[in-house]
């Protein structure tokens, strides 16, 4: 073989050896801490990898445990992205200093201002609503009107709801503080407690089951739990959910209480650009449609339709409150619930 040929081959091999790592580095990776269960997020992460070549390393866990982990890891945390539920938890992450603000023209164009932090610390990915649910045939929906009206004596011993330790209920009370003031929210909390059918226990599905079983007539729960029961492979769960009606409260006023699941950039993210790219993907039409169809949640984007399951409950007016306020008012809401005897 001629020396010139050997030289050309050697040069080609050198170029290949240099080019391959660049390609690998260009693809990159992103480390995600997710409070959402794996089955509710991994299909989207796999799709993101297919489209971009960016590897996603997923860690799942309870929301509070993940926040504690981020705090303990500090600057040494490998996390790039935190995905969690409820604006109250996103606010806690912000206060703990474990997430960092960033700006994205893409996200600001598709995520309404009320569903993202004003300072860019987090962006909502899905909307979850917490309406009044009632047992068909036992409650006339014409007698329902607002969250505030649930303190009426006609509901004495007829309401099931989770404990005051539940972040969803804390955010509901925080929304009442924002709307009506702290004094009115405390009066409401005391009145609601007096109408409980039983001491709070269990999750949202347990409140729905208790209502159908005759323990109570009204349950306060997030709609995606009911949607999951309606679409369950378990015939018993479908039968239970089929007996529940959904009433949208406060439609003549501020609108029904809503919350979000959201994403935030970790404070010490080693793969910052990849993490932001993933958040933008999760706010994209394809991911939003998947959320709507598979998770029973409302898309954060106005240009993505809700699922057939959610459509059967009709459109509703949402409270326009910026959800960052739910986190800011959370400590006050917890104190109010404690004073009201909400266990």
Image (cartoon, grey):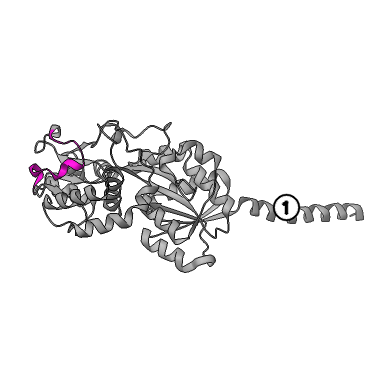
> Relative to 95, is 212 on the left or the right?
left
Q: State the residue lying farthest toward the right.
A: 3
Element type at mark 1: helix
Q: Report which residue position mark 1 lands on.
A: 19
Q: Point out residue 55 in the picture as x, y percentages from the top left corner.
A: 55, 53
Q: Is residue 284 in sight in this rendering?
A: yes
Q: Is residue 17 magenta?
A: no
> Relative to 39, is 27 on the left or the right?
right
Q: Is residue 165 in sight in this rendering?
A: no
Q: Point out residue 199 in the picture as x, y percentages from the top left corner.
A: 14, 57
Q: How many marks?
A: 1
Q: Point out residue 308 in the picture as x, y percentages from the top left corner.
A: 31, 33
The residue sitting at 48% across, 39% down in the picture is 284
Between 305 and 228, the one lying in front of the other is 305
Q: Residues within 10 Å of mark 1 (few under 14, many from 20)?
A: few
Between 26 and 166, the one lying in front of the other is 166
> Relative to 56, is 129 on the left or the right?
left
Toward which corner of the image does residue 323 lie, by quadrant? top left
Give the position of the N terminus as an image quadrant. Answer: bottom right
The residue sitting at 29% across, 51% down in the picture is 168
The residue sitting at 39% across, 43% down in the picture is 322
Q: Point out residue 73 in the picture as x, y percentages from the top left corner.
A: 48, 67
Q: Is residue 147 magenta?
A: yes
Residue 263 higher or lower than 144, as above or below: below
Magenta stretch bounds? 143-156
Give the position of the C terminus as an image quadrant. Answer: bottom left
């Amino acid at each position: 073989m001629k020396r010139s040929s050997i030289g050309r081959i050697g040069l080609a091999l050198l170029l290949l050896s240099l080019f391959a790592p660049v390609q690998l580095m260009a693809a990159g990776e992103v480390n995600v801490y997710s409070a959402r269960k794996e089955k509710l997020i991994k299909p989207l992460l796999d799709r993101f990898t297919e489209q971009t070549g960016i590897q996603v390393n997923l860690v799942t866990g309870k929301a509070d445990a993940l926040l504690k982990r981020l705090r303990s890891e500090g600057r040494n945390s490998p996390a790039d992205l935190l995905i969690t539920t409820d604006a109250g938890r996103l606010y806690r992450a912000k206060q703990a200093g474990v997430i960092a603000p960033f700006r994205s023209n893409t996200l600001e164009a598709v995520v309404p201002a009320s569903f993202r932090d004003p300072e860019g610390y987090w962006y909502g990915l899905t909307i979850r609503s917490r309406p009044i649910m009632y047992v068909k045939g036992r409650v006339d929906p014409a007698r329902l009107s607002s969250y505030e009206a649930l303190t009426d004596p006609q509901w004495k011993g007829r309401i099931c709801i989770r404990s005051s330790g539940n972040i969803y209920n804390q955010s509901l009370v925080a929304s009442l503080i924002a709307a009506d003031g702290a004094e009115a929210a405390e009066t409401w909390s005391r009145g609601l407690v007096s109408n409980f059918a039983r001491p709070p226990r269990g999750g949202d599905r347990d409140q729905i089951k208790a209502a159908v079983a005759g323990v109570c007539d009204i349950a306060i729960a997030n709609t995606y739990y009911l949607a999951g029961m309606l679409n369950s492979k378990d015939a018993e769960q479908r039968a239970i959910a089929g007996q529940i009606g959904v009433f949208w409260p406060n439609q003549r006023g501020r609108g029904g209480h809503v919350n979000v699941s959201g994403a935030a950039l970790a404070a010490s993210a080693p793969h910052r650009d990849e993490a932001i790219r993933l958040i933008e993907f999760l706010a994209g039409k394809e991911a939003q449609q998947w959320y709507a169809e598979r998770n029973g949640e409302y898309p954060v984007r106005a240009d993505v339709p809700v699922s057939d399951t959610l459509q059967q409950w009709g459109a509703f007016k949402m409270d326009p409150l910026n959800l960052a306020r739910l986190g800011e008012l959370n400590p006050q809401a917890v104190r109010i619930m404690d004073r009201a005897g909400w266990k």
